[in-house]
Amino acid sequence: MTPEILLVLGILLAVIGVLVTEVMPLEVLAMLVLGILAVTGLVSPTEALAGFSNPAVVTIWAVFILSGGLTRTGIANILGRNLLKVAGTGDTRMILLIMVIAGGLSAFMNNVAVAALMLPVVMDIARKTDKSPSILLMPLAFGSLLGGLTTMIGTPPNILVSEALRTNGLTPFGLFDFTPVGLIVMVVGMLFMTFVGIRFLPQRSPFASGQKDEKQIISQYRIQERLFRIRIPKKSALVGHTLASSHLGSRLGLNVIGINRGRQTSLAPDGSEKIQPDDELIVEGRLDRIQEMNNWGQLLSENIGPDKHALLGCGMQVAEVQLSGNSPWLGKTLSELGFRNRYGLNVLKILRIDREISLNIKSLQLNAGDVLVVHGPVANIDKLAAEDTILPPVVLDAAEVTEKYEREKKVRLFSIPNTSRLLGMTVSESCLGDALDVQILAIIREDNSAVVPASEVKFEPGDRLVVSGMSDLVGVMLMQGLEAVFDKDQAGVEDVSILQSDTVGLVEVILSPHSVLVGQTLQEISFREKFGLTVLAVWRKGAVIRTGLRDLQLQLGDALLLFGDWKKLAILGREPDFVVLTEKMQEAAREEKAKTALAIMAAVLLPVIFDWVPIYIAVVIGAAVMVLTKCLTMEEAYRYIEWKAVFLIAGMLPLGVALDKTGAASMVAESVIAVLGPFGPYGVLFGLLSITFMATSIIPTAALVVLMVPIALKTSAGLGISPYPLMMGIAMAASSSFTSPISHPANVLVMGPGGYKFMDYVKVGLPLTLVILAVLMVIIPIFWPLAM
């Protein structure tokens, strides 16, 4: 084994590890791979960049634009509307029709785009026929994947294997060379889903939005548990503040969904609405946040004299301690160390070389040279000083403490009256500070001794609390408390029914496959401010998330339950980053251009069928004409291109070249022949198909094909068999991504709306995969004989 082979195999293993774990964006991985291959000399600089001009890559991005043109002209919408007319109400007929239409569209369109287009249509069908979306949406996703197998432009793996044959001096597959095998697989797969797979589909309906199914939404999200009313006292500090500036959302995580003012009720109020005395706010959120505020209302505020220091006295100090270079704390967080309970000290701030950090310091990984500003009893600081992990502490004087920390941290002093219900409660039971970014730094006992409160410490008569993070508005609001209103209708129809009316309603949305918001939080995109809508919950991977939504990073497949004005919900439907799960909320398609788009598609395919023009030239011209005829705009064209796939393929192609040039592909092929050769050509075909089927569950399909192609070509040459059946098999297996939600974006797309869990895909997808494997073993040798 040469050094070059060792190097390229090492790169290959690292690439597979990153593809499986996704520890970095796949586009970044692709660029790193081509750069490393060029720097190490495994390929020339020209070969490293050749992927971007490769005909397969050009064909793929041009097909994305053509697919976008068919999308924006409403081809799927037109078919979907007609679907309901002939689908009837039977499960079997409905599933079969959905899969046939999705499969037919996917033969010439991007299958993820087809799934996204058909999703609102199928959801509307589920509502109108009183069907569970869970029995319709997985067939939709699988139908779009099966349809992509039937033509060369149906899915990137088909394009890649065809181009690989041309590059290696062999006759490439034609546009419809995939059709005989792909069509049989599609028919068998659809029949399996219709008559067998339906038995494994879950019967649940978490996302029915119609008035008829309102109770199902309430039950699924347990919204009734989180709906209550709070009354605003006449002298409340909130009076005169807008909802946006009230801190009810940012500090307490409460969504104000309505205001009762006298005899009038205002639903889905704007953030600029001002709070008035005696208002009754209808809110959605956690009741314990209000209970926490009322516990703060049990305290009495004390003035801190000019000659006194809240952080000092009673045997307390503030000191700076620096971590040594060999500290075992490095790379760990304060939470992981259990710092506060272990040492009885608060960390007020972390001083790092380039900045001072005072927010979210509990979850921050510690670095060498970090300076922890600690506060607590002198004895505890002395105990910390004995640790080998830090340099000797530097105790700060009173002037530094006042200037740097007491003012900045908004430190205040409170006392617990003898009649308070907090007496005898533990710090944990009181929930003080859980929601408001307010922290109890110390408890000063009646004998003037001070302790840093651990969760099990109980409040005693005469206690005084040293508290940080208390802004003026929050402080006054806490002292007054808010009154939660309960009555016999609290969790009943009266409160719940306000979520659906002629003016406001509940709607589910998912991120579009072309969304640029993946990885961002609702707070970062200013969702509430931009759209005036409230996110009540997020459905992710079979579970409902109802808290911490402002800071939750959005993922493809997330379903967001929104509440707001119907007009604002309709505006959201025109945003390209979201797909609203009802067709009436979708941006109007340019249906007047539908015939033009179909004519362009026919004009692209005709010269390719008769071999007049190479496909990569035909699709580029077709993409340009789509834009020129205004079937879609140039901005939309850019959005419909799946740039992640383009970069990934362009970056992986040089790795395939390196595997071939260094002899690594030949070495792997020899191993394949040694293991599978004794079973004959059929054994080799079965082995390569099985490997590809297993790998497609965890590795992106396009990358998998690029890695498998050189091995298949070398294996066929070594055995003296035709490469065509092996290449056809790899293309079919790579695109049959049914066994997990993460194996293909189309599967992720329907996971939230269908309420699916990971095992639902395994239960349905695994037997479907085994059936397709058996079918391929029978039909591939018939249409593409193994013998040369």
Image (cartoon, rainbow, N blue to C red):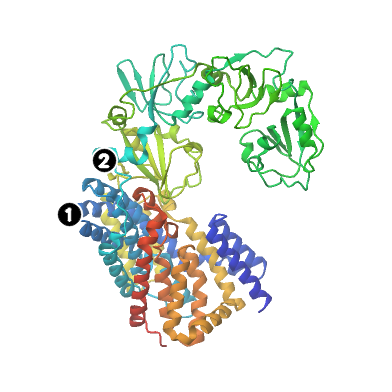
Give me the residue at 43% from left, 63% from top.
60
Give me the residue at 40% from left, 58% from top.
64
Spot occupied by residue 737 in the image (x, y as percentages of width and height): 41, 63
Give me the residue at 44% from left, 14% from top.
233
Label pair 1/2, CB-CB below 8 angstroms: no
Q: Which residue is mark 1?
A: 88
Spot occupied by residue 650 in the image (x, y as percentages of width and height): 52, 64
Q: Quadrant of the N terminus?
A: bottom right
Instruction: Let me know if residue 707 appears in the view.
Output: yes
Badge 2: residue crowd in 10 Å (few <14, some 14–19, many ≥20): some
Is residue 193 left or right of 766 when viewed as pictured? left
Is residue 734 left or right of 492 when viewed as pictured? right
Instruction: Let me know if residue 107 appears in the view.
Output: no
User: What is the number of the mark on residue 631?
Assistant: none
Q: Can you say whether 434 is above or below 626 in the image? A: above
Which residue occupies the foreground of this view, 398 or 60? 398
- Badge 1 marks a residue whose secondary structure is loop
Kindly give the residue lying farthest to the right in the view shown.
Answer: 392
Disc 1 to disc 2, C-alpha distance: 20 Å
Q: Can you say whether 436 is above or below 126 in the image? A: above
In the figure, residue 409 lies in which quadrant?
top right
Q: Which residue is mark 2?
A: 213
Q: Can you say whether 440 is above or below 743 in the image? A: above
Amino acid at pointer 1: Gly
Which residue occupies the foreground of this view, 287 or 646? 287
Give me the residue at 63% from left, 13% from top.
302
Which residue occupies the foreground of this view, 250 or 389? 389
Badge 1: residue crowd in 10 Å (few <14, some 14–19, many ≥20): few
Amino acid at pointer 2: Asp
Q: Earlier in the sequence, mark 1 or mark 2?
A: 1
